[in-house]
Image (spheres, rainbow, N blue to C red):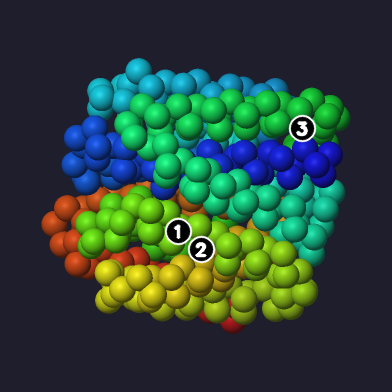
Amino acid sequence: MTVLIAAFYFFYFALIGVHIIFVPKILTMVGYDPLHVGIVFASAPLVRFAMPFLFLKGFRLDQQVFFLSLMLMGIGAIGFYPALEHFWALLLVNILFGIGISLILPYIEVISLEQIGKERYGRIRMFGSLGFIAVALVLVHYLSTPQSGILFLIAMAVTTLIFGALIGNKQNKLPLSECDSGDDSCHFTITDHLPLWIGFFLMQVSFGPFYNFFTIYATDHGVSLDTTVWLWSFGVIAEIIMFYFQGPLLRGNLPKILQITAFITVFRWLIIAAFPNNTMLLFAAQSLHAFSFALFHSTSISILFHLYKARRLAQQFFFGISYGLGGFIGAIGAGALYQYTPAYLFVGGAVAALGAGIAFRLFSNR
């Protein structure tokens, strides 16, 4: 099972790499303006935010729902090809893609934490980072047309579907959702730890400029596409190193670690805002991805794994509120900022990360 999970992470995050590094550039190649790019990229996070609320009404993230989500992801990815030049069709297939990915990762993350443990989790999760960097370094040499990039997206989606199906098939007997037991201890609510959830939301809002516009932003400031891909890759290398060595840190004060990662992220976005064409400083900023993504992500899911007995539901809400609602607001906000005040794109990200740091501090002091 460990090998299958590692392979799944590799291809799933290779798929995410194509989607967030190259698809924004592909859309601008087709002729979409920044605001339309922001709308398209906001649709999947919005779906990701909405989906967990269905599971408060009796739905369960079981094997059948997991297989359905894999199929929706695959159909959505394949749909990009015929829909590429038609905005409303493109928006629809991106929503289908978003529904699929909103359910796939929470299912796998809980399996990983249950079978591997939080101290060893990073050493398996880093295969996702390897997939992300591998596809970035390969695709940059083949992105001659928008269609070639979409074919890479489809290939990664199909491979992810295959490994996800193998894991789902092997996990034949899933435990009942913790919230189905009727036990009061399984009650799930975000209001008990509201500052924590606000921090998750704001942290992902701060990534809106980066995930949706960094490639466009860097190349617009004179950085070549090759160098931009190396900037992405350098950040992922830093992330891989952190995933490999973070185990001892996760035995420490997890709320304090969240605060540190948020304040480091503020510094990171300010560097990019102030020095958009200084390659050396951009590489320095990317090295901080080790903290603002890798350590933050592992710390977040570890805290939730221990705070809530409804573990799958907690992970769904984490991805829904942070990568979902936070990603939606971040994408829309980044699109508007880059359309009207491009110089303040990453300043906006820094303000959101500062808010996250304050929220995590409030959570830590409760």
Quadrant position of the C terminus in the picture: bottom right
Q: Nearer the viewer, residue 23 or 73?
A: 23
Kind of residue at badge 3: Ile
Q: Within 10 Å of the Cα at label 3, are there few (<14), some (14-19), or many (20+) other Cα atoms?
A: many
Quadrant position of the N terminus in the picture: top right
Report whether 310 appears left or right of 329: right
Between label 3 and label 1, give the one nearer the viewer: 1
Residue drawn where x is 27% and y is 76% of the image: 274
Answer yes or no: is residue 98 visible: yes
Is there a contact, CB below 8 Å, between mark 3 and mark 2? no
Q: Nearer the viewer, residue 333 or 312?
A: 333
- Under tag 3, what secondary structure? helix
Q: Within 10 Å of the Cα at label 2, are there few (<14), some (14-19), or many (20+) other Cα atoms?
A: many
Mark before the other along the chain sequence, 3 or 1 = 3
Q: Nearer the viewer, residue 62 or 41?
A: 41
Mark before the other along the chain sequence, 3 or 2 = 3
In the rendering, which numbered label is found on residue 230? Answer: 1
Residue beneath disc 3: 167
In the rendering, which numbered label is found on residue 234? Answer: 2
Answer yes or no: is residue 184 visible: no
Q: Nearer the viewer, residue 39 or 155?
A: 155
